[in-house]
Amino acid sequence: MKKHNFSAGPCILPKEVMQKASEAVVELDGSGLSLIEISHRSKAFVDIMETARSLALELLGLEGKGYQALFLQGGASSQFLNVAYNLLEKRAGYVNTGTWSLKAIKEARLFGEVMEVASSQEDNFNHIPKGYTIPGDMDYLHLTSNNTIFGTQIKEFPKTDVPLVCDMSSDIFSRQLDFSNFDLIYAGAQKNMGPAGTTLVVVKEDALGKVSRKIPSMLDYKVHINKDSMFNTPPVFAVYVSMLTLQWLKDLGGIAAIEEINDKKANLIYSEIDLNPVFSGFAAKDDRSAMNATFNITDDTLKETFDEMCKEAGINGINGHRSVGGYRASMYNALSLESVGALVDIMSELERKG
Ligand SMILES: *Cc1c(COP(=O)(O)O)cnc(C)c1O
């Protein structure tokens, strides 16, 4: 039976991408060789890497604006330290909006002074802090655009002269933003772009080279830029699948087109959460994420029935993260409106039964 995959990550990818990727593992484009057994220096793979890098910049509207796209390894978690290694000379600001922000703060503290300029920790991260003051004398301000675990999303980014760095792991390529407002954006592939194994880093070139410390080659963005993101053997499969997903997105009409669908999905589930007395939303309404909808069941005695109904309908991956409890429906780019409809049908059926 076809499953509706609401997994928070690694997550659903477009079916045609899966098909093409699985074929390429056996044989890449009629070459007689598998994608994963050819040299990363071969023309075939160099083309794949270059296409992936330029598609990323093109979709974000950053082509010809002094940015470079890199496909690195080590997950978004490595970027928590990489960002500080490359950009933190003296002092940086962090907005603490959840588990991932906290981890980023912890790593950055190894490299310099870190100021938590705002936090919603006291409320178990159920909202995005607003109206906070940003001191001017900071190397950068670090934000997490979408808080995967808590289901909150920054709708309006702070206006400041301080360079912005953003962890966009769980909502990159999902909505239109002026991406040129950021000096550096990073995102683990496995939420909205590809399989685990690569992390997209988009960096403004003139933001680099300002720290006095020596940077080990593997952690130095400049080294990776100078080697066209091929300083060492790149994760060829993850980069290839990411390229296919970006191509899929471009063919669909780019971020504007997917944003329209993502908005429909979000509206559908949140109106059910608000109308149905059996459920209550976790995140503050203004800050609700269009990617991860977090909600609770108000009557615990219905939980077993709901879980059973979900299972029967092929609804997969909606258990909430242990730090929030309840449920979390992740609705990344490749999840269809129809799948959200299937979940919403079960939710309203439960109300009728209960
Ligand atoms: C999943 C996630 C991460 C961690 O990514 P890894 O690739 O597993 O290191 C970091 N930030 C956010 C916002 C995430 O959703």
Image (tube, rainbow, N blue to C red):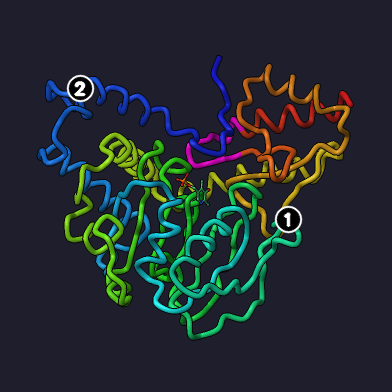
Above-or-below relation of 140 to 314: below
Crowding at label 2, few (<14), some or many (≥20) Cα neighbours within 10 Å? some
Marks 2/1: CA–CA distance? 48 Å
Crowding at label 1, few (<14), some or many (≥20) Cα neighbours within 10 Å? some
Magenta stretch holds residue 336: yes
Compared across the picture, whether 239 is left or right of 330 comes to left
Which numbered disc covers residue 216? Answer: none
Q: Which residues are magenta?
A: 330-339
Q: Secondary structure under badge 1?
A: loop
Q: Nearer the viewer, residue 168 or 321?
A: 321
**Earlier residue among tags 2 and 1:** 2
Which numbered disc covers residue 27? Answer: 2
Q: Secondary structure under badge 2?
A: loop
Determine whether the beta carbon of the residue marked 1 sits less than 8 angstroms from the nearest atom of ligand 1: no
Please state, as top left, top right, bottom left or bottom right, where the N terminus lies in the image: top right
As shown in the figure, which amino acid type bears the numbered disc 1?
A: Asn
